[in-house]
């Protein structure tokens, strides 16, 4: 979503890839980007051989006067070399040390020829980094100097765009509009953004009528649904500020025509209600608020609407009022509303009474009062004809299970399954009964209920899930023979999913039945060749522990693409697409050069993304590249070309995603794709840092690469919803702990986690601690890395040392997915880079 002018983020690798590419525009490979060469007379540290002084003529030696002994002449401090300073600055920026890079460039800039293109390019770079450091005022000063310099047209355009951004972020809106306007007179892929930023600045200046014109121009360009919605929201605000209330509501209605997320729809309706109030049409506003209460009771905007209605003295149906308060966890108010509803005159009956009883019971459970809840719910449980009969059964069953009344809970779950027979709800009710038994330590009984849930499910995928649960639990409770006895017919294996066949493979190995091992292994390789189960079954057959190798050595390829790998990929691509694609390698850069124009060159979204990335607007660039992924999704040639281009730009996440989508087309799944496609999908970026840390802490580099791919897709500035940072997604509290233990880096701050060197060292150090704590058990160590060592210890104790049982024992979904994905990642990394 576009939320207006945003400060650039100091994302080191992306800054280096995007900004250094800009700085190098038009320069030869061997010439510094600002135009000076090391050793030029213009450089301060250049040296030349001086001429020998003439031999003095011999004369009588005078008697020296009685003077103090002369002191040696101090050696002059050499003037710093701007070439070296700028090179060091780029290295610091690449490592995320942006303040240090700024300081070095500030020292270098005055040493360059005043008013030169070199000085201008340095000022442009400084401005970009100042924006990255949230210093728009300083950036504006540097960028003004850059704009006044004789830059190339491309650099001059970028400088002018960034100057407008810096001025706008500094509150200098009039000057910002002028800067954006100067670029709008040229041809640029950023035109829709320039109109958008101009409109934002005009709105901030109190000129909404003029802003409307610019917003409409921004909307003229093709855009994603997210971009369209964001721009229309801003246009709606401008129309409201300009007094065009109907126009503002029309914009919100236009978004509602395609928006599907309930929370977002509710907020848009709430905004429309606010416009109606501003237009002094309160009855229309209250009607919109009432519609929210009835249609979207679970959303935050609806709770705001309810409060506004009550404050305005409007009558709100007590049942709906109570439901909204339940979702808002305002339970006392909800209880009062339900009491009023059930005591209404005339008394409620039929479906309305059922709804009041259901929601009152649900609210009492949230308040911790099971007795009061059941007093309401029992009325529904006693009436099989009630539309809320099954819902009431499930509420009571869940409450009973949570309070340790397992048998009663199982009975109600079974009744709910009977009441909803033939639906997914029936299968889930039986699975709920199985989970209640598991929680009570009655695993053997739970097996049958999972099997029953599988039989009851009309959905094949859900049925396979529950069959897998039953097989895994059967292995733990009754042993390998029981798994094989209960396994479905191999002839029907295509419908079983991979989990049950995996446990059949493991069981056949345990009991020594090689024919069954091969038969069930064949099922997995035919139906799910790239799955976790396929990877883990291969390890079992080879007698390997999960993600284990005999050596920590790796065979990393050259940094440049190999021609043989490119040729193989192009041949495979031709077979996939039916199109012959020809390309070679640039001998200087090693980049792929296409004989025909690559397809990304014809994508307007790609051009916008590349331009945005070049000036450091990475979030906006990512939005455009996401659109490109959708645009290219069914075109294998375009995906391959884009994956290579994104790699060269340093847009690693998008490169990996494009290559992964392409690899999935291979026969036999991802492992069957050509080597170059796999290397793009499973890369070894930051290998210098990874190999050093791996050697320092004794961790397999391939495991580290597999983990980084899962954690961040090699995006150095990745930030999770849990506030984990960087390549290896270290949370701030853990980061502080590790910094204290290592005594490094100096003056540690949380932002250091976005530096690849810090993130990799911290992550590998922490992983090594978990591996040591769990005696080299990779599965347990990964679970600890993701979910905490305390949980991992409990799961490991329950699993009895079996890593496959461990995965099934984990009680949280996220670490299960995490471990399974890293196992699959590791298998491909092993295929590509094992020595």
Image: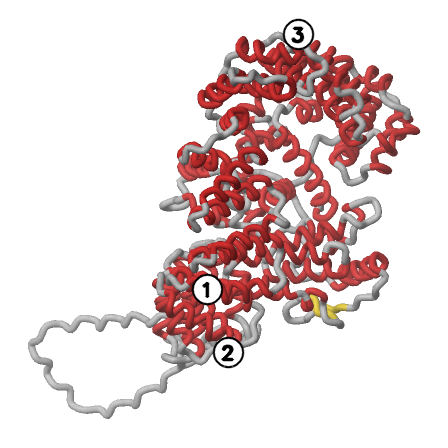
**Residue 146 seen in this snapshot:** yes
Question: Disc 1 vs disc 3: which is toward the camera?
Answer: 1
Q: Are marks 3 and 2 in contact (CB under 8 Å)?
A: no
Which numbered disc, 1 or 2, marks the residue that appears first in the sequence?
2
* Residue identified by numbered label 1: 211
**Which of disc 3 and disc 1 is earlier in sequence?**
1
Q: Residues within 10 Å of mark 2 (few under 14, many from 20)?
A: some
List x then y, in percent, for residue 779.
64, 30
Residue 388, given in percent of the width and then of the height, sits at 66, 19
Seen in the picture, residue 228 relative to 406 is either above or below; the reply is below
Q: Which mark is residue 385?
A: none
In the image, is residue 654 above or below residue 426? Answer: below
Q: Where's residue 831, x and y in %?
A: 74, 45
Residue contact between numbered discs 1 and 2, judged by CB atoms under 8 Å: no
Residue located beneath label 3 in the image: 408
Q: Name the residue: 83% across, 29% down.
A: 496
Percent across and percent down for residue 469 are 74, 23
Q: Which residue is mark 2?
A: 152
Residue drawn at point x = 47 percent, y = 60 percent: 91
SS at badge 2: loop
């Amino acid at each position: 979503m576009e939320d207006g002018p945003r400060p650039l983020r100091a994302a080191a690798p992306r800054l280096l890839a995007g900004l250094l590419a800009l700085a190098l525009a038009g320069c030869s490979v061997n010439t510094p980007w600002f135009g000076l060469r090391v050793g030029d007379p213009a450089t301060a540290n250049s040296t030349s051989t001086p001429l020998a002084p003439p031999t003095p003529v011999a004369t009588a030696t005078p008697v020296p006067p009685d003077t103090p002994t002369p002191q040696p002449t101090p050696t002059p401090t050499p003037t710093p070399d701007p070439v070296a300073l700028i090179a060091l600055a780029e290295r610091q920026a690449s490592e995320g040390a942006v303040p240090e890079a700024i300081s070095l460039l500030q020292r270098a800039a005055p040493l360059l020829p005043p008013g030169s293109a070199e000085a201008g390019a340095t000022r442009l770079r400084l401005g970009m980094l100042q924006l990255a450091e949230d210093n728009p005022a300083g950036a504006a000063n540097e960028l003004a100097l850059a704009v006044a310099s004789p830059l190339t047209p491309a650099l001059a355009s970028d400088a002018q765009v960034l100057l407008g951004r810096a001025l706008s972020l500094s509150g200098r809106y009039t000057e910002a509009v002028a800067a954006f306007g100067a670029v709008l007179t040229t041809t640029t892929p950023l035109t829709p953004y320039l109109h958008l930023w101009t409109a934002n600045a005009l709105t901030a200046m109190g000129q909404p009528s003029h802003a409307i014109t610019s917003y409409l121009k921004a909307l003229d360009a093709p855009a994603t649904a997210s971009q369209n919605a964001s721009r229309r929201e801003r246009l709606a605000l401008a129309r409201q500020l300009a007094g065009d209330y109907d126009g503002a509501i029309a914009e919100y209605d236009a978004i509602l025509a395609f928006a599907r997320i309930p929370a977002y729809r509710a907020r848009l309706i709430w905004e429309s209600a606010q416009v109606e109030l501003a237009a002094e049409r309160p009855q229309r506003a209250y009607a919109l608020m009432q519609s929210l209460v009835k249609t979207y009771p679970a959303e935050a905007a609806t709770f705001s609407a309810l409060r506004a209605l009550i404050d305005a003295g409007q009558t709100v149906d007590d049942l709906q009022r109570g439901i909204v308060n339940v979702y808002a966890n305002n339970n006392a108010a909800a209880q009062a509303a339900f009491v009023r509803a059930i005591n209404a005159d005339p008394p409620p009956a039929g479906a309305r009474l059922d709804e009041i009883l259901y929601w009152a019971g649900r609210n009492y459970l949230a308040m911790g009062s099971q007795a009061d809840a059941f007093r309401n719910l029992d009325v529904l449980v006693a009436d099989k004809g009630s539309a809320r009969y099954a819902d009431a059964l499930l509420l009571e069953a869940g409450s009973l299970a949570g309070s340790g009344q397992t048998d009663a809970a199982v009975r109600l779950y079974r009744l709910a399954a009977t009441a909803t027979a033939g639906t997914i709800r029936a299968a889930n009710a039986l699975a709920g009964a199985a989970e209640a038994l598991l929680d009570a330590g009655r695993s053997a009984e739970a097996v049958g209920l999972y099997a029953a849930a599988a039989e009851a499910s009309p959905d094949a995928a859900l049925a396979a899930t529950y069959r897998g649960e039953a097989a895994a639990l059967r292995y733990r409770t009754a042993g390998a023979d029981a798994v094989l006895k209960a396994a479905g017919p191999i002839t029907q294996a295509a419908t079983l999913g991979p989990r049950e066949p995996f446990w059949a493979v493991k069981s056949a190995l345990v009991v020594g039945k090689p024919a069954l091992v091969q038969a069930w292994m064949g099922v997995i390789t035919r139906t799910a060749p790239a799955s976790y189960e396929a990877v883990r079954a291969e390890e079992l057959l080879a007698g390997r522990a999960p993600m284990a190798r005999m050596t920590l050595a790796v065979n990393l390829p050259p940094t440049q693409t190999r021609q043989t790998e490119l040729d193989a990929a192009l041949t495979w691509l031709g077979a996939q697409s039916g199109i012959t694609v020809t390309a070679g390698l640039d001998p200087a850069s090693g980049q792929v050069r296409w004989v025909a124009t690559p397809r990304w060159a014809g994508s307007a979204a790609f051009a916008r993304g590349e331009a945005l990335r070049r000036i450091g607007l990475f979030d906006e660039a990512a939005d455009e590249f996401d659109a490109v992924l959708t645009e290219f999704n069914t075109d294998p040639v375009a995906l391959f070309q884009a994956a290579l281009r994104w790699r060269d730009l340093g847009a690693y996440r998008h490169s990996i995603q494009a290559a992964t989508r392409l690899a999935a087309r291979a026969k036999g799944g991802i492992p069957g794709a050509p080597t170059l496609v796999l290397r793009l999908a499973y890369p070894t970026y930051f290998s210098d840092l990874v190999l050093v840390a791996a050697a320092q802490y004794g961790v397999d580099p391939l495991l580290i690469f597999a983990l980084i791919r899962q954690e961040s897709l090699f995006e150095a500035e990745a930030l999770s919803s849990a506030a984990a940072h960087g390549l290896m997604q270290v949370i701030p509290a853990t980061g502080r702990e590790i910094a204290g233990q290592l005594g490094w880096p100096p003056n540690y701050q949380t932002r250091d986690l976005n530096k690849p060197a810090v993130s990799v060292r911290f992550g590998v150090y922490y992983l090594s601690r978990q591996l040591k704590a769990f005696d080299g058990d990779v599965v347990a160590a990964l679970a600890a890395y993701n979910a905490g060592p305390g949980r991992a210890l409990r799961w490991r104790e329950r699993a009895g040392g079996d890593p496959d049982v461990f995965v099934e024992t984990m009680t949280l979904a996220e670490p299960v997915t995490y471990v399974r994905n890293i196992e699959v990642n590791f298998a491909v990394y092993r295929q590509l880079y094992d020595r």
